[in-house]
Amino acid sequence: MTAFATTDTPLSEVLDAGLAERITTAFGHRTVGDLLHTLPRRYRQHGQRYDRRELVDGERVTIIGTVATAATRTYTTKQGQPREMLTLTVKDEDTTFKVVYFAGRRIKFMLPVGTVAMFDGTVSRFRQSLDLKHPEFLVLRSVAGPGGQLKGSGDLAALARLSAEIDAEGGPSLFDRPLLPIYSAKESVTSWDLLGAVVTAIRALVPVVDPLDDAVRQAAGLMGLDEALRKAHLPGCVEDADRAGHRLRFDEAIALQLLLGARRRFVARDPAPASPVRGDGVRAAMESRMPFELTAGQQTVLEEISADLTLDEPMNRLLQGEVGSGKTVVGLLAMLQVVDAGRQCVMLAPTEVLATQHHRSLTAMLGDLGERGRLGAADQATRVVLLTGSMSTAERRAALLDIVTGEAGIVVGTHALIQDSVDFFDLGLVVVDEQHRFGVRQRDRLRAKGRDGMVPHLLVMTATPIPRTIAMTVFGDLEVSELGELPGGRRPISTSVVPARDRPRWVERTWERVREEVGAGHRAYVVCARIDADTTDAPDGATKGGDDDRAGDRPPLVAAVELHQYLSTGPLAGLRIGLMHGRLPPEAKDATMTGFATGDLDVLVSTTVIEVGVDVPEATVMVVMDADRFGVSQLHQLRGRVGRGGLPGLCLLVTNSREGGKAMERLNAVAATTDGFLLAQLDLVQRREGDVLGDAQSGALASLRLLSVVDDGEVIEIARRHAEEILDSDPGLDTHPALAERVRRLSGSDESDYLFKY
Ligand code: ADP
Ligand code: MG
């Protein structure tokens, strides 16, 4: 074992080989730096009190207390062996624990009355008593008085030896420290193993060079790295621990922001197809015949986008807006501006149904402006082409021909399809609809589709508001525009929870409401979490697992096929009811959707294939069955499908969840507000980032250890500012080699290779 270590020194050179190996296997840490960059889960404060009412059965506790009484009792094991059971009462400030060792003969000599010791084990509650059975222990002050040897059991014994070593060197005694770190343990590596490893590593660690300039450190009020690495583990006070943790999180944040900033700059260097606004083009023609005025919000956003498109630098913009806030129109006008410059646009939808719907509504909005090549088309006309996987070979070939020759000004399809196999004549703008998980990789692939090395402009539209911190990390290289209001004085829809288990009558009332709406000439959606009784899980995008209901304790999920049957012959008999789900052939889906849109159907029973973007203005009710199976954002998007035509909308969330449970709480939150941003935040807190980031959580984000995009918004913002400043003066990070190294590590070689070639 070496006496000196840097953060790059392998653990095996610093620690006992067995321990090093166990730590590597359990946590993946290979170097001293890996180990020290893992923060304690919490700190055990000297004299910290446990509130005995709050301690739960099975909770792991570490107590430091005085042995008040000790009693032994002899008993015989089943195997006939005599044993001594040792029972201690240990007083910790104001709580008394009962500590029991079944084989306590040796131990009783180490823990006589008056001994101060640390005990680490699991609590069990028995009547009024808090029991610790066989806790590991460490004698901190033996009754023999000062100079008495530290003795301990289990992992604490190893720590005791280390502590004795430190004491012998005259260092501040390990167990006299005001705060003792407690680490997240694994079965093979205890918190005490980790503490021992960390203390050993810190003792060997030579002062660590700080990658941040003094200027940045001072401006951001940061502790030095060397100090932070030590104090994160062995803080003198709570404030030390906080500041140390903050510094280490900041390091991750700034590396991430440097990566994103470098990428943004890299992308901005590519030429993009400048597309100035023309007074005589198809955009102008469309604007002059729009059936409504753009809202002030739409105008502002369109101006922002318009200005970006005129530049020869690629636009990277995220357009956020509530469902129904009128993003599609904005997207269309942006596309027409690019078409006016002689280039093509593509609109990507998450599903085929949505692509088809977009194609239909864009074509309808454009009228003869979209009929290029046909007799009677307007002069400036363009052509809108649909590309889906379910088209016949001939249709597909015709579409691809239009795309490659440039006949098609606007191409609509799913992104899987277009990203892989389509060549454009001259692609100027990519509009991505309702795909907030559109990550860096997907974007990079589309960047390559432009003509002559040009990079197409990009507009991502989403109704799932992305909290600012996420926008700054996942979309760290996107500008953000927001659409706040709903057009046309439309009222937000009202939402109610229908607790089917507790109030079956309300379910009947739900179907009566549907009848009433249909009677008034309106239409209704009924959404189910699964297709039929054979599908075990939610196949069409519903989230898995109700979170507070045990399986078996609740009725099976309502299936679309069965419900369609039941409603048709039962509560909604006589109404025209369509059925739609992902396993139907495309023609059937299309026919059903068209039927519902035109009014040939009154009710549409469906899975979440209709989730986003479908626009049927006459639809006024949405019933969601097993609503607890859907995420907050998903429910918010679903209900955005109703109340789009100036009629008040109603959303009924049917659930078998219990009153007072987590799922019910979530549904009540959805019912209580239509503020998408609030809901997005809620969603984020409930699902944590892994889920929210989805595909976008590639490479860099996956390797964040300490930083949480949910909790560390402020750190991320400050780091971003400093990252920008650093890149402004040193875009290649040439004078910041240590930072460059961190960014490289964070991103993995595949990404950073191209980033720093200036
Ligand atoms: P989003 O895509 O943001 O959910 P859409 O673009 O589909 O919203 O718009 C929802 C509905 O509102 C559509 O029927 C659209 O025609 C209509 N709409 C859009 N902008 C306006 C406006 N400024 N005034 C009136 N109606 C509008
Ligand atoms: Mg839309």
Image (tube, rainbow, N blue to C red):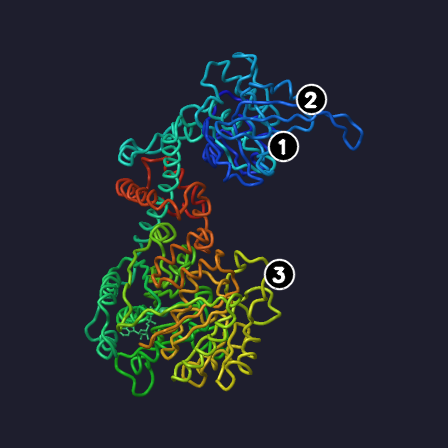
Q: Is residue 457 visible?
A: no
Query: How far is disc 1 from disc 2 in space, using C-alphas?
Result: 15 Å
At mark 1, the secondary structure is strand
Amino acid type at mark 3: Gly
Residue at label 2?
105
User: Counting residues from the N terminus, which is met first, the one under dot 3 or under dot 2?
Assistant: 2
Vertical order, 382 against 546 (above or below): below
Position of the C terminus, as image quadrant, is top left
Q: Residue at horizontal 43%, vertical 63%?
A: 634
Q: Residues within 10 Å of mark 3 (few under 14, many from 20)?
A: few
* Picture quarter with ligand 2: bottom left
Q: Mark 3 points at which residue?
A: 552
Q: Which of marks 1 and 3 is nearer the N terminus?
A: 1
Q: Name the residue under label 1.
A: 133
Q: Does the residue labelled 3 lie within 8 Å of ligand 1?
A: no
Q: Where is residue 4 in the image (x, y as percent from the top left)?
A: 48, 22
